[in-house]
């Protein structure tokens, strides 16, 4: 099988690593996914929705610190990344 399109062909190895980190942060902040049960959904079910929201807020703060250090830069634009929307929804941006 031949792949005609390489999604990271114009990126450096460092940029690819940064994209993967932002994608992982976006994934961990999901609290509703129709295909898989997220970690935050499991917390809401095992404890309370309130505890899940508190954990999500802490995760958001950690994600923001990482985003500020490794995210947006002159060589890689994350302004349209779904993580930014999640951070905005948590009122962190």
Image (spheres, rainbow, N blue to C red):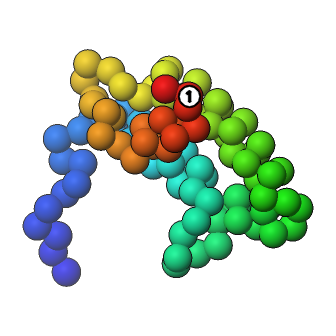
Quadrant in which residue 64 is drawn: top right
Q: Nearer the viewer, residue 13 or 70?
A: 70
Q: Is residue 40 left or right of residue 72?
A: right
- The residue depicted at 54 percent of the width and 69 percent of the height is 33
Residue 51 visible, this orientation: yes
Q: Give the percent coordinates (x, y) of residue 79.
A: 31, 33
Q: Mark 1 highlights which residue?
A: 92
Q: Residue at x 30, y 40 (%)?
A: 80
Instruction: Give the vertical position of 32 relative to 12 (above or below).
Output: below
Q: Left or right? Give the position of 92 relative to 20.
A: right
Task: Depth check: give the residue in front, 74 or 15.
Answer: 74
In the picture as drawn, the residue positioned furthest to the right comes out as 47
Q: Is residue 74 above or below residue 91?
A: above
From the top left corner, tell me how far across and down residue 24 is, in percent: 52, 49
Q: Quadrant of residue 54?
A: top right
- Is residue 20 visible in this depiction of the protein? no
Q: Position of residue 69 (x, y in %)?
A: 50, 20
Where is residue 36? Give x, y as percent. Answer: 58, 75
Q: Secondary structure at mark 1?
A: loop
Residue at 81 percent across and 69 percent down: it is 45
Taking depth in this image into account, of 84 and 75 the one nearest to the observer is 84
């Amino acid at each position: 099988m031949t792949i005609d399109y390489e999604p990271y062909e114009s990126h450096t190895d460092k940029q690819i690593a940064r994209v993967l980190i932002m994608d992982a942060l976006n994934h961990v902040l999901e609290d509703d996914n129709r295909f898989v049960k997220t970690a935050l959904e499991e917390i809401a079910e095992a404890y309370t929705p309130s505890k899940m929201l508190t954990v999500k807020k802490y995760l958001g703060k950690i994600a923001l610190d990482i985003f500020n250090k490794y995210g947006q830069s002159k060589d890689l634009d994350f302004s349209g990344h779904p993580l930014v929307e999640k951070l905005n929804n948590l009122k962190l941006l």
